[in-house]
Amino acid sequence: MKDNGSSADSGYPGPSPVPVPPYGPNLTRSKIFDILSFGAKGDGVCDDSDAFQAAWKAACKVPGATLEIPSEFKFLIKPITLQGPCMPQLVLQIDGILLAPAEVGSWPISSLFQWLNFKWVQNFTIQGTGTVDGQGPQWWTVSSLYYTQKKLKNILGLKPTAMRFYASYNVTVRDIKIINSPQCHLKFDNSRGIRVDNIKISSPENSPNTDGIHLQNTQEVEIQHSDIGCGDDCVSIQTGCSNIYIHHINCGPGHGISLGSLGKDRSVGCISDIAVEKISVQNTLAGVRIKTWQGGIGSVKNVSFSNIQVSNVKFPIIIDQYYCDKHFCKNQTGAVAISGVKYNQIIGTYSVQPIYLACSEDIPCTDVDLIHIQLKPSRRYGGSHQGLCWNSYGISKAPLVPSSIDYCLRRDSGSIVKRIARFLEHVC
């Protein structure tokens, strides 16, 4: 099946995944492939894409190889696909700077989904002290993007992701910086066994749709000890994701940690087994958020948000089953069911509303726990002490600040939970 940047089923041809290699293996020079040795100029002006591709193909054939992007050089790289499967323990060492083309018109229409596309790789590590720079400002400032060929052609607002992995297994990304992506900075599609550690993602607060890390149809993920500031979700978790562990993250600016949106155009959305803990969220739209469209199908279940520190966050806690990114969305029956969501130790300040639980009239949120919630208005406060709580069932436990949170959840005798469980039995 053709991979065009969407999340279609993988045709991955490689062998079964193997363990991630240890950090810093001892390498002989015969296993080090410097991009400069393959004709790269490193001046930030000449196109070094062919050299990058050639170095990749050579390193891919050698077990334990390292492809080096050396420090003190800037490499201009056009949209490129680096494809596996490769020999085990391949490392991409980024110590210099990788630059995307700055001019929107220089991007081929066929490459508008992503810039650096890693496909069918496994047992693979990206690491280093360098920077991946998507050079996004021109993409953000143009209200209607056009592509110039023989004539102006509308490209429907498509913008590339800086770094994308497709159908890849046992991948580690650590220590590098990813900045100013035209759209999402780091994306994993149809992948498994992902580890992100000690990276920095940065783009301005007003850069549209620049998610930090985006997960879709991806399982067994750990994201830790990283700083993420962007114009959209710091971490976005989409359908098909499970066994995700996110901890020790600094988020802001941005839209917080988000599950969804799910269920658009009556589609199926399934997310389960998500743990988010020890997170600091500052000056963002949301803290921890679940968002689904009316009319969707599927479920979000077994989700835990714990030990979340918020500072001047507009809405620290959100469940929104009426999500709409337009001026108007028509009402629809049905919803992606949300159950088993735990909020424990969400502490700090808000600027608009402490809690927002807007659950479906037809399929309410069930088994929601609010424990040790302490949210106070920030100094720039101009919002409400009252939360919005609609059709959500669960339990709350003190301390709860503001005290109105104690009345946010309805108590359920068990009948609603059982009905929802029957509804979900054959969906996800």
Image (tube, helix red, strand yellow):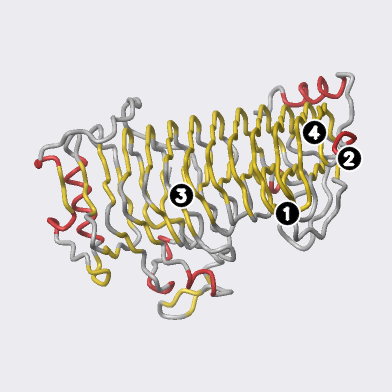
Quarter residue 340 falls in: top right
Amino acid type, residue under disc 4 in the picture: Cys
The span from disc 2 to disc 3 (Cα, nearest Å) is 39 Å
| Residue indicated by mark 1 | 314
Residue found at the far front of this picture = 379
Label 2 residue SS: helix
Q: Nearer the viewer, residue 58 or 152?
A: 58
Give the numbered dot on residue 365. 4
Label pair 4/3, CB-CB below 8 angstroms = no
| Residue indicated by mark 3 | 186
Q: Is residue 305 left or right of residue 242?
A: right
Mark toward the start of the polypeptide (4 vs 3)? 3
Q: Nearer the viewer, residue 194 or 362?
A: 194
Label 3 residue SS: strand
Mark toward the start of the polypeptide (4 vs 1)? 1
Mark toward the start of the polypeptide (4 vs 2)? 4
How would you rate the neighbour count of disc 4 (Cα within 10 Å): few for under 14, some for 14-19, many for 20 or more? many
How would you rate the neighbour count of disc 2 (Cα within 10 Å): few for under 14, some for 14-19, many for 20 or more? some
